[in-house]
C-alpha cells in the first residue's frame, strides 16, 4: 500500500468512525448527552471513583466532569459517597438505576449496530469481522 493510499484510507476510516459514533450516540440515551452516558458507563464498569480519576479515564477536564456528575447525581444515576481513604474527598458511585440505564443504552446501541451490520453484504460483514483484531489493537484492546 502506498503512502497516498494509507493517507486516503486513514481519512475514510476517521470519517466513517465519527459518523458511526454519532449515529449510535443518538440511539437509546434519553435525556443524557454522550459525555454523561460515557461517564456512567465507566462507573458501571469500573466501580466508584474519585472525580479526578474519572476525569482522567474519560479524557475530559475535571470541571467538565464535575458538571456531568452533578447532572447524573440529580438524575439519581450516581450518588456521592465519602472516600474511605480520604475523608476530604468523595467517590462517584453508580446507583442501581444508573447501572440499569447504561445497560439499556448499551443494549439499544448494540442492537442498532447489529441491525446495520446485518444489512451489509456477506463479503463486507466478513471484512468487518476480519478487521476487528486490527481495530482492537489500534485502540489498545488487544485480547
Image (tube, rainbow, N blue to C red):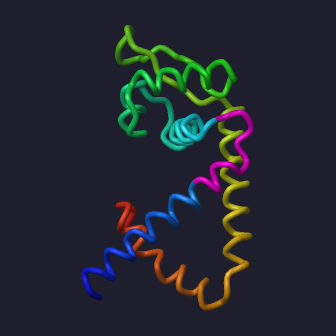
Q: Quadrant of the N terminus?
A: bottom left
- What is the number of callouts on the image? 0
Dominant SS in magenta: loop
State the image quarter where residue 8 is shown: bottom left
Residue with the most extreme left position: 3
Q: Residue at x 35, y 61 (%)?
A: 140
Q: Which residues are magenta?
A: 22-32
Location of residue 80 with respect to 7 vertically, above or below: above
Location of residue 98 with respect to 121 vertically, above or below: above
Q: Point out residue 136 in the picture as x, y percentages from the top left corner.
A: 42, 67
Q: Quadrant of the C terminus?
A: bottom left
Q: Point out residue 81 in the picture as x, y percentages from the top left corner.
A: 52, 17
Q: Nearer the viewer, residue 9 or 76?
A: 9
Is residue 31 a member of the stretch shown in magenta?
yes
State the image quarter where residue 138 is shown: bottom left
Location of residue 110 with respect to 125 vertically, above or below: above
Relative placement, left or right, of 41 versus 46 is: right
Is residue 27 a member of the stretch shown in magenta?
yes
Q: Residue at x 66, y 38 (%)?
A: 99
Q: Nearer the viewer, residue 99 or 130?
A: 130
Location of residue 96 with respect to 114 vertically, above or below: above
Q: Residue at x 72, y 33 (%)?
A: 31
Residue with the most extreme top position: 88
Amino acid at each position: 500500500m502506498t503512502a497516498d493510499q494509507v493517507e486516503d484510507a486513514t481519512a475514510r476510516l476517521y470519517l466513517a468512525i465519527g459518523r458511526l459514533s454519532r449515529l449510535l450516540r443518538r440511539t437509546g440515551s434519553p435525556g443524557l448527552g454522550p459525555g454523561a452516558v460515557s461517564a456512567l458507563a465507566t462507573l458501571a464498569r469500573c466501580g466508584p471513583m474519585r472525580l479526578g480519576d474519572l476525569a482522567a479515564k474519560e479524557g475530559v477536564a475535571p470541571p467538565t466532569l464535575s458538571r456531568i456528575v452533578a447532572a447524573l447525581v440529580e438524575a439519581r444515576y450516581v450518588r456521592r459517597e465519602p472516600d474511605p481513604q480520604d475523608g476530604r474527598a468523595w467517590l462517584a458511585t453508580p446507583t442501581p438505576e444508573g447501572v440499569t440505564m447504561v445497560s439499556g443504552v448499551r443494549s439499544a446501541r448494540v442492537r442498532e449496530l447489529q441491525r446495520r451490520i446485518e444489512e451489509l453484504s456477506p463479503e463486507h460483514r466478513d471484512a468487518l469481522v476480519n478487521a476487528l483484531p486490527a481495530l482492537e489493537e489500534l485502540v489498545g484492546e488487544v485480547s
